[in-house]
Structures are given as structure tokens and as C-alpha cells.
Image (cartoon, rainbow, N blue to C red):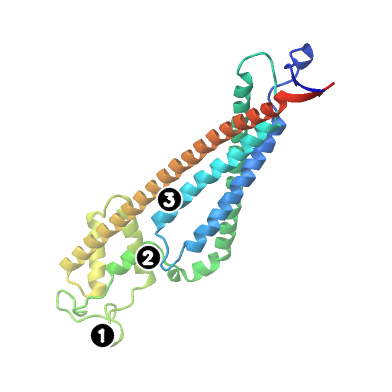
Amino acid sequence: MTDTAIIVPPGTEADASHTPFSWSSAIAGALAATAVTLIIVALGSGIGLSFASPYGSGPSATTMTVAAAVWLVMAQTMGFATGGYLAGRLRSPSHDGIVGETTFRDAAQGFVVWAIGVVAMATIAIGAGYFAANAATRAASGLATTVTANSSSTPQPADYFVDLMFRPNPNGVATANGAAPTSDTVGTAGAPATLNAETRAEATRILLRGVSQGGLDDNDRGYLAQVISARTGLPPDEAKQRVTSVESKAKDAVKEAADKTAKAGAYFSFWTFMSLLFGAVAATLGAMLGGELRDAEGRLVPDVE
């Protein structure tokens, strides 16, 4: 005859040395969470790259950024929910007579799974960044000789603004005082002389220093206007106006780049916080669910007489 027997929770001294926390279950859950998260992130990266287009026909950069952030939150949630559930099911229950203690310990087990998983993922990210930085350094070292030999072939952010300053005068190359153009002012066939590397580098340094300090001083602005007037044939007043205009555009570009960097950093911090928060909640709830199912399956067992 088969009856249903209730197992009484052990409370003897033999169980006093048993710890309610299981490191093996927590580590196993963290590894599972990390693996599931990386798989989902890899899937999302593949989907995103399939939609992205360098010709602007695909989704906008803002749309792709938001989609990637939401996908990261989902990946963290699913990964840590899986890891927390496994840790809760694998942990041995500890009955010590305290009401509700098992649920709390299951939740703590899931939270520790999240903590271990975050450390593991941060280690992976730091390691990947370190190797990427080393690869970039080696590539830069390999190209150092070529760049040094022909530095003018490598565009720099300030090159565009220097080009703006030294654009030829569309009205001709005559100087402001009416003097005949010299060989330094014009090249062959009456065209403006090619800007030599030394003058260009000097103008770049002056412009960068002025922008970094909030603006050019009067001496630098006057010198650049003089050089521009001699090289392009612009009158001194127009040359000064061109220097002021280019300076303003350069400062606006620097400000815009700084604003974009700050916003990108703020978005990254916010979405990282959201993904970690959802991961912590998912790991905790998953472990509680796993513990409930574990205890439900072990509460009633058949007793054969």
C-alpha cells in the first residue's frame, strides 16, 4: 500500500556544520549566465551588422544605438535569469527552523551569481580591450616610418580648417597693395603658390593652440592674416575675416565633438546601469523560482510499505 509521507526538515546537530551557501552552484550559475549573455550579444551583433549600411540606406545611427542598448539589457536579463535559476535548483536546501530563510538564501544565491558574472564579464571586456589596444599599437608602430616620411598624406582633424584659411582668392592673386605678385605668391601660369609643409604645419599649430585656449590672440591672428594674404592674394581685411571665420568654425567643431563624447559617455553609463540592474533582478528572481521548484519536487515523496 502506497501512502504520502511528509519529510521532516532535518534539525539535528549533524546539519549544524552544513553551510546554506553553495559556491559551486554560484560559480556554475555565473558561468552559465556569462555564456548565455555572450551568445545573445553575438546574435544581436550579427543582426545589427546585417542591417547597417555605410551608404546611409539602413537605419540611422541613433536607431542602431538604441536597439543595441535594448538588446544588451535583454541579453543580461536572459543570461542572469538562466544562471540564477540553475544556481537555485542546484543549491541544497538548508532547513534550520527559521521561517522564510530558505527563500532569502535562494535570493542571496542568485545575487552572488550576478556578482560573479559581472566580474567575469568585466574581466573579459578589459582583456579584449587590452589586446585590441596592443594590436593598434603594433599597427601604428609598423606605419610610423611611412607616416613620418610622408606625413602630409595622413589627414588630420585640423587639416580641413587650414585648407579653409588658405583657399585661393577667386578674384585673382593680386596683392592688396597693388604690387605685382612675387614668385613666393604665385606659381606657374599665375596660379597661387603651393603652400609648403613648414608654413602649413606652423599655421596648424597656431590654430590648434588658439582653439585649445579659447581663441587666438591678436598677434597670432594678425600673423595668420598676413600669411593668408600673401599666399592667396586676399586683402588684409578679408584675410583677417577669414581667420576669424575659420577660428569660429573650428571652435564650434571642437565643442560639438566634446558634446557628442559627453552624451555618448552618459548614454553608455545609463544603459550599462540598466543592464546590470535588470541582470541583478533577473538572477535573484530566477534563483527564488528555482528554489521553489526544487523544494516543491522534494516536499512530497511516495512511501512504500
> Distance of mark 3 from mark 1, alpha carbons?
55 Å
Q: Position of residue 91 (x, y in %)?
A: 70, 29
* Label 1 neighbour load within 10 Å: few <14, some 14-19, many 20+: some
Q: Nearer the viewer, mark 3 or mark 1?
A: 3
Measured along the vertical axis of the image, is residue 122 above or below residue 48? above
Q: Position of residue 1 (x, y in %)?
A: 82, 23
Q: Would residue 83 appear left or right of 225 to someone viewing this image?
A: right
Among numbered discs 2 and 3, the one appearing first in the sequence: 3
Residue 66's disc is 3
- The type of residue carrying mark 1 is Gly
Q: Nearer the viewer, residue 149 or 183?
A: 149
Instruction: Answer yes or no: is residue 220 visible.
Output: no
Under tag 2, what secondary structure?
helix
Which residue does the numbered mark 2 point to in the structure image?
201
Question: Image point 14% across, 75% down: which residue?
Answer: 177
Measured along the vertical axis of the image, is residue 76 above or below residue 184? above
Which residue does the numbered mark 1 point to in the structure image?
190
Q: Quadrant of the C terminus?
A: top right
Q: Nearer the viewer, residue 184 or 245?
A: 245
Instruction: Answer yes or no: is residue 90 visible.
Output: yes
Q: Would residue 57 appear left or right of 304 to someone viewing this image?
A: left
Q: Pointers 2 and 1 in contact (CB under 8 A)?
A: no
Under tag 1, what secondary structure?
helix
Among numbered discs 3 and 1, the one appearing first in the sequence: 3
Q: Residue furthest bottom?
A: 189
